[in-house]
Image (cartoon, helix red, strand yellow):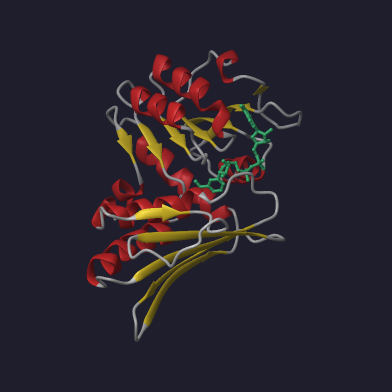
Amino acid sequence: MKLIISGVFGRMGKAVAALAAADDDVRVVCGVDIAPGTADFPVAERIEDYKGEADVIIDFSHHSGTVAICDYAASRGIPLVLATTGHTEEEKACIAAASEKTAIFMSANMSMGVALLNKLCKEAAAFLDGADIEIIEKHHNKKLDAPSGTALMLAEGIKSVKEESVFVLDRSSVRQARNKNEIGIQSVRAGNIVGEHEVLFALGNEHITLSHSAFNRELFADGAFKAAKFLVGKAPRLYNMDDLVAQK
Ligand SMILES: NC(=O)c1ccc[n+]([C@@H]2O[C@H](COP(=O)([O-])OP(=O)(O)OC[C@H]3O[C@@H](n4cnc5c(N)ncnc54)[C@H](O)[C@@H]3O)[C@@H](O)[C@H]2O)c1
């Protein structure tokens, strides 16, 4: 598999490059990064500068590069694993348009465990009618976006079974009691925390907490790698972790 890694000198890009180096079936044909660095494969500053062959792209750069990478993948018909988070509405529209021309796999969290957490949260929300739902996410002090894409993904999952849900990200100006339809999302940024997500379902007499802890970044790199292998040869559309889980 000929692989392009976007964001190759970042924390996640390096983890993907290490996995690629250990896999005889994978060859990194180009790394892309706006920051300087060294690698034992060619590296371009802009993805448009790479004109050679590629079977798939894994992007762990920054959402501001999404439009360029989607245009590139769509115009060249190269499948794209989009692992960045924090996309704007304009970027989301661009992803949707590009997925009509090439296969795009997108997930704010590439962990199979989080895919299961997402499924369990939907079940719990449907089952525990009337529960107050709060999401607490914790990440390292270098993370650029808040709340995490995973927390929003979990909230969207719950909203898919409880349409009346309203996301509340900041209660600092609130002067009234909690509304039943709220899903509060709280962010903690500290130290080296790789990623923790806790979803609390609070009823009057009992609490249920579903949680996931990531212990290292290889977990996400591994998921993105599995997604890349899954995506090669797939028809254009938007894929996500449900498609990968359905294969198991
Ligand atoms: N989906 C997942 O499972 C998952 C897991 C971890 C991180 N992430 C997301 O992946 C992204 C990267 O995370 P990270 O911790 O590796 O960040 P990082 O800051 O360590 O690395 C990002 C790298 O991308 C480069 N970059 C930035 N803009 C670029 C552009 N336009 N073109 C090319 N390169 C560019 C930076 O120079 C840097 O080397 C973030 O959006 C993060 O939220 C997703």
Number of marks in the image?
Answer: 0
Residue 11: where, in percent of width, then height?
66, 45
Foreground pick, 112 / 98? 98
Furthest-front residue in this view: 175
Furthest-bottom residue in this view: 205
Q: Is residue 28 visible?
A: no
Foreground pick, 3 / 145? 145
Q: Quadrant of residue 27?
A: top right
| Quarter of the render that holds ligand 1 | top right
Name the residue rendered at 32%, 30% in the picture. Answer: 233
As displayed, is residue 225 above or below residue 130?
Answer: above
Name the residue rendered at 53%, 51% in the picture. Answer: 147
Quadrant of the image containing the C terminus: bottom left
Residue 239: where, in percent of width, then height?
32, 39
Residue 146: where, in percent of width, then height?
57, 49
Foreground pick, 89 / 44? 89
Q: Is residue 29 visible?
A: yes
Residue 238: where, in percent of width, then height?
32, 34
As displayed, is residue 17 above or below residue 207?
Answer: above
Foreground pick, 114 / 155? 155
As displayed, is residue 143 above or below residue 56?
Answer: below
As displayed, is residue 70 above or below residue 243?
Answer: above
